[in-house]
Amino acid sequence: MKGKYTLAVAILAHQLGADAFAPSPSTGKIMDRVASSLFVSTTPTTDTKDDWSRPDLQGSSLVEDTLQQMESDVEFQELTKKIAKIGVDGMTKEERAKRRRALDEIGVPNFLQFVAEHKEDDDDENTSTNDADTSSSPVKSRTEQLYRSEPTILQLNIGLYCNQACNHCHVESSPLRKEETMSADVAARCLELLQNTPSIDTLDLTGGAPELNAQFRFLVKLAREWANENNRKLTIIDRCNLTVLMEPNQEDLVQFLKDNQVNVVASLPCYGEDNVDAQRGRGVFQRSVAALKMLNEAGYGTVEHPELELTLVYNPSGPFLPPSQASLEVDYK
């Protein structure tokens, strides 16, 4: 995972088995999704790292440190100059070209090419079986190649502001992105859309760090209350960078997530401290582990609370696909 890139071609989210890990010998608490051995094997044990809970970090912000690192980051400075020269639209076109070249190198076909090839296969199948049911095929005719099914997931990027500036972030979130944020009016309209679309069963909130947006708790609380009042089954997902749990004024965030039955999809791009900090910023690994312990203590990822799901996300640091989930699970353990 060494090396620095702005492009992440693929992201693998994998659910670690609830019964896969032994109790932590240092705390006696079950860490079903995140093993204590996962952490202590990566760096020498010191007095400061015996207790991964790190209560001293609670309420301290990463923002100033992130901004300092961005100022000294050569890649970031070059990116800033390029945006000033060719604009965001120009950067988007350039990023698309880079992504296409990276996908070509690993043999991933162009999307339109993929559709055309499957259209030909579908035509051959329909010719041999005229009465075949093609409702499950995404390709219907040459004039209408794709059809829209009923939406089941409402995913909202509610703002690009973040306390981190990860080099794999495909939307370049950072503490500088203060203006690109969802307003209260838009949040209310999204809730109205959710209420009026019966097929939607999942509300997926992302960012930036979505929890640092003023509309995050408004969306979560009202969506959960509405779902409960109307006997509507609704999964709410918080795509969390973990370190946000340690930020000032977020001391009650874990309890808020638990109270509103929010599933946490958490970024932990590697099991090694050096790799994580190189990819996500100085001090991120220790804060992430401390945040995971907080989630565990609240019941997330434990057999006692199967309704509190905790999923880890592996982020490739370059233009390549991640290893298989099975091999990653072994490495993380």
Image (cartoon, rainbow, N blue to C red):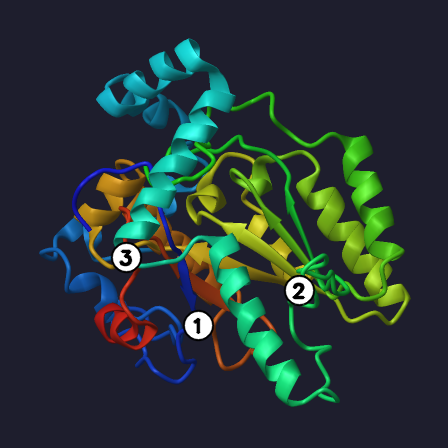
Mark 1 and mark 3 in contact (Cβ < 8 Å)?
Answer: no
Reading the image, the residue beneath label 2 is: 261
Question: Residue 309 at what x, y percent from top left?
Answer: 54, 69
First along the sequence among labels 2 and 3: 3
Q: Indicate which label's residue lies in the foreground, 2 or 1.
A: 1
First along the sequence among labels 2 and 1: 1
Residue at 72 percent of width and 57 percent of height? 143
Reading the image, the residue beneath label 3 is: 106
Above or below residue 74? Residue 227 is: below
Q: Is residue 289 left or right of residue 173?
A: left
Q: Is residue 73 visible?
A: no
From mark 2 to mark 3, how far is it between C-alphas? 39 Å
Secondary element at tag 3: loop
Which residue is more in the foreground, 66 or 181?
181
Which residue is more in the foreground, 43 or 103?
103
Question: Residue 122 at what x, y percent from top left?
Answer: 59, 75
User: Which of the 4 image quadrants contains residue 277?
Assistant: top left
Above or below residue 319? Residue 262 is: below
Residue at 74 percent of width and 46 percent of height? 219
Secondary element at tag 1: loop
Above or below residue 204? Residue 214 is: above
Q: Amino acid at mark 2?
A: Gln
Q: Amino acid at mark 1?
A: Gln
First along the sequence among labels 3 and 1: 1
Q: Indicate which label's residue lies in the foreground, 3 or 1.
A: 3
* Residue farthest to the top, as pictured: 85
Mark 1 and mark 2 in contact (Cβ < 8 Å)?
Answer: no
Residue at 65 percent of width and 82 percent of height? 126
Secondary element at tag 2: loop
Reading the image, the residue beneath label 1 is: 15
